[in-house]
Image: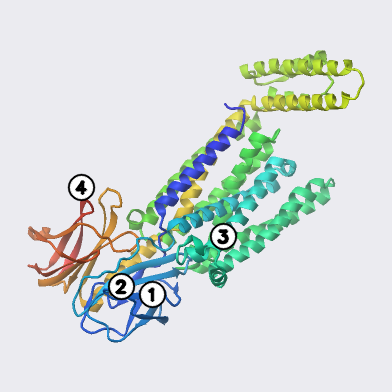
């Protein structure tokens, strides 16, 4: 096992960057948490006369400003007035100019959902008859690109900083109060505060561009920053900064005044005060997430927000305490088994809270068992659950090491370290040998590593003795002070190295360090998955939006709309095929096929084919080859459905010369 922490820290850092980069790249652009459920005119519809306005209905409330909705004619010229208004529950509209020509029009929208995530998309409708259009909608969704990546990394960093700040402080106060004097622990907690503060400031600056143009140049636009400060998310970020100012005072007292207190009663009172104040600050910080993201929208918000605060605090206490324990095991001269035992009990309680709050959150965000496998949110949640199970399994191994460390008598390495600390620097080789022999007689663990350690100790002590003799033999002179300082530094370095070897020779401590290091590695991945999960559209929202879209389409025109996801397996091969059949009855029907990317943008692909099969009557497949009329839009007229029944609608999508897939879904026709 390596004798230094640097290689392991580098490994964890590389793992953190690799996982974060992969997950953020895989999740960009960010999935929206509000979906377009209806529009007037409807997507793909053909109206006889030009409408006076275009209306959009979303699955939840959105923040919309002038210019959020744009309507473009076939040549790409704007035909809307730019003024948006709210017409009803989650319904918004923009007025159109009069005298619009016939042809296909494109509607684009970019808004912010109630849980702070940007939403964008586009669809088409036609006046008189469909026509070709020169409009090219950008593939970049709101929240994507460089700005989206930076914002996602800042969110990850803010979670990590919160965990280190809250969990590190809780570990010191509740488990290891002597740790307030350890520089490595102090640096860990302060680093958490700096990371959270820096990430919060970065998110404030990035927010305007993240939900708007996505341009790097808009990051420092003060007008956008002013607009952000008036939003719910902006208020949450400012509140977080104010709480971090109180957190800075808490850190100063914890690692400053607290350590200097010698009176036990006075120290106990200060501990109680710090615990109360620290809990208030930590809960307030957690609430800044709860009041601006998932927990603040949807069902049972009065319950979900306090539950979310508890969930975040439990995560911080567990993973932040784990990080502090890891630093203490590697960098601190010693840590009492009692402190490790106390953290083990606290971690167990945190996991219990995590399980209870996680079950409620999963039910609230998924809504059905099918959403586990049928939505991106459910699939990510399964990955998160798997990582938590692995983490708990490794934690169980750590608890076994903790039990052995607590029950076993003091090892040779620990006793030798204490003896070394108590022995004067000018101890003779004879006295050192006696001490080593006495320690060896009392040792309960005799390993080859300890034997080797004894030899190294003797060499170090002999070297120190020679240095002292040389120092004594040196005549007094002008260079004595410099020489003495140099020898003191050398002796200090030798003593530090000896203490580290003695500390690392304890097999129980080494075993605990390895298991805690493994926990920390899994925790890094878990945090990255959780960050992406909070930016993914919940399964309940996805299913409700699909149901509302289908119901709206059926109610308005009697038409049938079927959404079928596909993945051809090649580069840029994922998307969604929407098949609309009007009037969805026996006989002739008009069929429209819309192919979209995962972000809702029109997907320009080489070929689409459709077939209908009625398996109950052994009819089909009946092939249909629609004609392309616009980007991502195919149509066919006179599609014959011979009888009513539960038809299998198969769509063959080809995204390149070699990448093709056929997907299907059943639907009632007639």
Q: Nearer the viewer, mark 2 or mark 1?
A: 2
Compared across the picture, whether 574 is left or right of 488 comes to: left
Residue extending furthest right? Answer: 476
N-terminal label among 3 and 4: 3
> Considering the image in quadrants, where does the N terminus appear?
top right
Q: Nearer the viewer, mark 3 or mark 1?
A: 1
Q: Which residue is mark 4?
A: 658
Dot 3 crowding, Cα within 10 Å, few <14, some 14–19, many 20+: many
On residue 351, which mark appears? Answer: none
Camera-side residue: 462 or 227? 227
Q: Which residue is mark 3?
A: 309
Distance from Cα at disc 3 to Cα at disc 2: 47 Å
* Element type at mark 3: helix
Q: Which residue is mark 1?
A: 69
> Considering the image in quadrants, where does the C terminus appear?
bottom left
On residue 76, which mark appears? Answer: 2
Distance from Cα at disc 2 to Cα at disc 1: 14 Å
Q: Nearer the viewer, mark 4 or mark 2?
A: 2
Distance from Cα at disc 4 to Cα at disc 2: 33 Å
Image height check: is 445 above or below 284?
above
N-terminal label among 4 and 2: 2
N-terminal label among 1 and 4: 1
Compared across the picture, whether 299 is left or right of 197 comes to: left
Instruction: State the image coordinates of residue 270 (x, y, percent, origin top left).
Output: 78, 53
Instruction: State the image coordinates of residue 533 (x, y, percent, origin top left).
Output: 45, 55
Camera-side residue: 559 or 309? 559
Q: Nearer the viewer, mark 3 or mark 2?
A: 2
């Amino acid at each position: 096992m390596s004798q230094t922490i640097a290689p392991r820290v580098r490994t964890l850092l590389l793992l953190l960057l690799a996982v974060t980069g992969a997950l953020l790249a895989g999740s960009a652009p960010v999935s929206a948490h509000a979906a377009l459920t209806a529009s007037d005119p409807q997507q793909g519809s053909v109206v006889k006369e030009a409408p006076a306005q275009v209306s959009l209905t979303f699955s939840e409330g959105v923040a919309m400003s002038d210019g959020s909705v744009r309507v473009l004619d076939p040549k790409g010229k704007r035909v809307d007035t730019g003024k948006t208004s709210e017409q009803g529950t989650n319904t918004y509209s923009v007025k159109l100019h009069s005298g619009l020509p016939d042809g296909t029009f494109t509607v684009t929208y970019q808004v912010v959902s109630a849980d702070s995530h940007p939403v964008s998309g586009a669809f088409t409708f036609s006046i008189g008859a469909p026509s070709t259009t020169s409009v090219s909608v950008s593939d970049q969704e709101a929240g994507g690109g460089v700005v989206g990546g930076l914002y996602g990394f800042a969110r990850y960093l803010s979670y990590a900083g919160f965990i280190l700040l809250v969990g590190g402080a809780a570990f010191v106060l509740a488990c290891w109060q002597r740790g307030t004097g350890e520089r490595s622990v102090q640096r860990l907690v302060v680093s958490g505060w700096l990371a959270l503060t820096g990430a919060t400031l970065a998110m404030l600056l990035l927010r305007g561009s993240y939900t708007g143009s996505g341009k790097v140049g808009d990051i420092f636009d003060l007008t956008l920053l002013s607009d952000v400060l008036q939003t719910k998310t902006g208020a949450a970020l400012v509140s977080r900064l104010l709480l971090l100012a109180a957190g800075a005072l808490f850190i100063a007292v914890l690692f400053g005044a607290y350590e200097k207190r010698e009176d036990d009663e006075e120290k106990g009172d200060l501990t109680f005060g710090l615990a109360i104040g620290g809990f208030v600050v930590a809960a307030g910080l957690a609430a800044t997430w709860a009041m601006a993201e998932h927990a603040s929208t949807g069902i049972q918000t009065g319950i979900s927000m306090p539950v979310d605060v508890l969930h975040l605090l439990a995560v911080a206490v567990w993973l932040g305490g784990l990080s502090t324990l890891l630093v203490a095991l590697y960098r601190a001269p010693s840590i009492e088994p009692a402190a490790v035992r106390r953290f083990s009990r606290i971690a167990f309680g945190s996991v219990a809270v995590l399980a209870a709050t996680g079950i409620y959150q999963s039910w609230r965000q998924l809504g059905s068992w099918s959403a586990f496998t049928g939505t991106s949110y459910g699939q990510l949640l399964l990955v998160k659950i798997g990582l938590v199970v692995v983490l708990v399994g490794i934690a169980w191994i750590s608890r076994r090491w903790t039990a052995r460390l607590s029950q076993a008598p003091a090892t040779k390495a620990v006793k030798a370290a204490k003896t070394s600390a108590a022995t004067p620097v000018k101890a003779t080789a004879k006295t050192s040998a006696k001490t080593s022999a006495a320690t060896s007689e009392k040792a309960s663990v005799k390993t080859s590593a300890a034997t080797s350690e004894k030899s190294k100790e003797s060499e170090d002590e002999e070297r120190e003795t020679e240095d002292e003799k040389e120092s004594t033999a040196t005549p007094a002179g002008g260079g004595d002070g410099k020489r003495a300082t140099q020898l003191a530094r050398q002796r200090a370095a030798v003593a530090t190295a000896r203490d580290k070897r003695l500390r690392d020779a304890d097999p129980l401590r080494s075993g605990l360090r390895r298991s805690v290091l493994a926990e920390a590695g899994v925790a890094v991945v878990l945090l990255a998955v959780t960050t992406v999960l909070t930016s993914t559209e919940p399964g309940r929202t996805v299913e409700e939006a699909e149901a509302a879209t289908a119901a709206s389409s059926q109610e308005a025109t009697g038409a049938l709309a079927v959404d079928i996801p596909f993945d051809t397996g090649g580069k840029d091969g994922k998307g969604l095929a929407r098949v609309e059949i009007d009037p969805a009855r026996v006989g002739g029907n008009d069929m429209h096929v819309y192919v979209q990317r995962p972000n809702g943008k029109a997907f320009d692909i080489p070929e689409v084919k459709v077939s209908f099969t009625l398996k109950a009557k052994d009819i089909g497949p009946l092939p249909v080859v629609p004609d392309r009329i616009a980007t991502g839009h195919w149509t066919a007229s006179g599609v014959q459905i011979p009888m009513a029944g539960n038809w299998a609608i198969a769509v063959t999508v080809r995204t390149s010369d070699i990448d093709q897939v056929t997907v299907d879904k059943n639907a009632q026709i007639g």
